[in-house]
Image: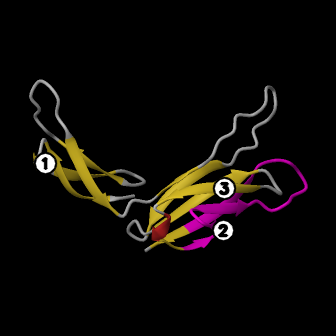
Amino acid sequence: CARVTSATLDGKLAIWKEQPESNDWHPRFTVSVKPGTSTLVVRHRGFFGYAVPFTPPRLAAPSENLKVVSEHWTNNGQTLELTVSGRPGRDYRLELVGAGRVASVQGATRDGNALVVRIASGSSDAYVDQRLAIALR
C-alpha cells in the first residue's frame, strides 16, 4: 500500500496511471526505451506491508506456520483486515514494513516493528482462524 509521488525514466518525467486491483492498486507505466541501459526511478510515500516468517516443517511433520487466509483493504485503503490461521496456544509474529503508519491494531499486539498474534488455546491441534484489523494513519 503506497502512493507513487513521481517517476523519471533516465532523468525525464515518466507518466503512469493507477491500475486498481481487487486488493490494492499498481502504477502502470508505458515507456519507450532505447537500446542499452535505462533506469526508471519511482518515488512513493506511505508504504506499508507485512511479512509472515516461514520455517519449513521437519520431514513428514505437519506445518506449524501462520497462514494468511484472506486480506481485504477497507476505508479507502486506510484499514487492512486480515484473517490468519495458526495452531492453538501459539504466538506468531508478523514483521511490519512502514510500522510508523500503524494507528491501531485489533486481534494482535504491537511489539516494536512487528505484530504478535496469539492464537487461543483449544481442545485440538487443528488450525484456528483469527481476524486482525490494522488501521493506518
Instruction: Name above or below for residue 59 compared with residue 104.
Output: above
Label 2: which secondary element: loop
Residue type pointed to by label 2:
Gly
The residue at the far right in this view is 123
Viewed as shown, does residue 27 lie left or right of 61?
A: left
**Earlier residue among tags 3 and 1:** 1
- Is 15 in the magenta? no
Residue 134 in percent (x, y) is at: 54, 68
**Viewer-closest of 98 and 72:** 98
Q: Which residue is mark 1?
A: 14
**Earlier residue among tags 3 and 2:** 3
Q: CA distance from mark 3 to mark 2?
A: 12 Å
Range of residues picked out in magenta: 104-133
Which residue appears at 81% of the width and 32% of the height? 61
Mark number, residue 106: none
Q: Which residue is mark 2?
A: 107
Q: Residues within 10 Å of mark 2 (few under 14, many from 20)?
A: some
What coloring was used for the rendering?
Answer: secondary structure
Viewed as shown, does residue 111 lie left or right of 41?
A: right
Residue type pointed to by label 3:
Arg
In which quadrant will I find the N terminus? bottom left
Instruction: Name above or below for residue 60 compared with residue 31.
Output: above
**Viewer-closest of 32 and 87:** 32
Viewed as shown, does residue 107 lie left or right of 44?
A: right
Q: CA distance from mark 2 to mark 1?
A: 41 Å
Q: Residues within 10 Å of mark 1 (few under 14, many from 20)?
A: some
Residue 33 in percent (x, y) is at: 11, 32
Labels 2 & 1 near each other (Cβ < 8 A): no
Which residue appears at 50% of the width and 71% of the height? 135
Which residue appears at 75% of the width and 34% of the height? 57
Q: Which residue is mark 3?
A: 93
